[in-house]
């Protein structure tokens, strides 16, 4: 599962990493991105070729939902069952996206307390979560939402949780976003990221509150 993550990358780095043609405004670092908040999402523009960045609400609402204010708003979707779930199937087939991150959090319960851990890639390389998106309604009622696809945890994350985000390598971006990519190829991209070199560091309690959004959230526990 992934219920909190961070995004601390300069706008120019995001532009280069995802081959965005339009320059981005300076991005504010985020250290405690939480469900229901607006999050940065990379996807294809209407021309089906050019990539762009948009802000979507984290918590998936399919376009056919009766009322976006009621019913489930999942923040994660299991990669293994995307085609089996009516909520996710159409979006997986035609509305895939990438959700940039610097790292994500998981918690370990010790006694009655939960202790947060921050998970990063080797060399603090950016993470690119596989995601899906949809738009409910139109006009003033229009609501654009997304969720993160999860897969089985690797050996580094498994002691904390049995699931983790599906992290895409840069050479998979085009296939993942491509509208003509065969479904078998898209499915094949959903796999556990190698554990080698991934760091899992205990952090302090600041991240436990969604009201905290500062570097203190990723600071090592004292």
Image: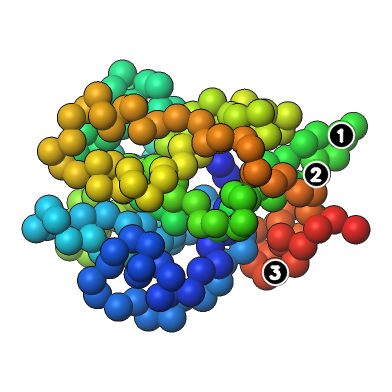
Question: Where is 35 relative to 179, above or below?
Answer: below
Determine if residue 153 is in view: yes
Q: Are marks 2 and 3 in contact (CB under 8 Å)?
A: no
Residue 135, image x and y in percent? 24, 50
- Mark number, residue 215: 3
State left or right for residue 206 relative to residue 51: right
What secondary structure is marked by label 2? Answer: strand
Q: Which residue is mark 1?
A: 110
State left or right for residue 93 relative to residue 205: left
What secondary structure is marked by label 3? Answer: helix
Q: Are marks 1 and 2 in contact (CB under 8 Å)?
A: yes
What secondary structure is marked by label 1? Answer: strand
> CA gap, disc 2 to disc 3?
17 Å
Residue 109, image x and y in percent? 80, 34
Counting other residues with Cα less than 10 Å from the Cα at mark 3, is it few (<14), some (14-19), or many (20 or more)?
Answer: some
Counting other residues with Cα less than 10 Å from the Cα at mark 2, is it few (<14), some (14-19), or many (20 or more)?
Answer: some
Q: Are marks 1 and 3 in contact (CB under 8 Å)?
A: no
| Residue plotted at (60% across, 57% down) | 124
| Residue plotted at (24% across, 75% down) | 22
Quarter occupied by the C terminus: bottom right
Q: Which residue is mark 2?
A: 115
């Amino acid at each position: 599962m992934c219920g909190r993550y961070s995004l601390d990358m300069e706008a120019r780095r995001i532009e280069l990493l995802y081959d965005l043609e339009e320059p981005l405004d300076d991005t504010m670092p985020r250290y405690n991105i939480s469900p229901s908040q607006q999050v940065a999402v990379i996807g294809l523009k209407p021309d089906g070729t050019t990539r762009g960045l948009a802000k979507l609400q984290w918590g998936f609402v399919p376009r056919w939902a009766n009322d976006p204010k009621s019913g489930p708003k999942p923040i994660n979707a299991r990669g293994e069952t995307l085609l089996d779930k009516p909520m996710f199937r159409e979006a997986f087939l035609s509305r895939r996206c990438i959700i940039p991150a610097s790292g994500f959090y998981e918690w370990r319960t010790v006694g009655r307390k939960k202790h947060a851990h921050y998970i990063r890639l080797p060399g603090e390389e950016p993470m690119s979560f596989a995601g899906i998106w949809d738009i409910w309604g139109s006009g003033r009622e229009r609501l654009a939402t997304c969720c993160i696809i999860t897969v089985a945890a690797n050996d580094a994350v498994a002691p904390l949780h049995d699931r983790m985000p599906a992290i895409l390598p840069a050479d998979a971006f085009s296939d993942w976003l491509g509208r003509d990519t065969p479904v078998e190829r898209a499915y094949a991209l959903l796999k556990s990221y190698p554990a080698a070199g991934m760091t899992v560091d205990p952090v302090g309690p600041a991240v436990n509150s969604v009201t905290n959004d500062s570097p203190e959230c990723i600071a090592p526990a004292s």
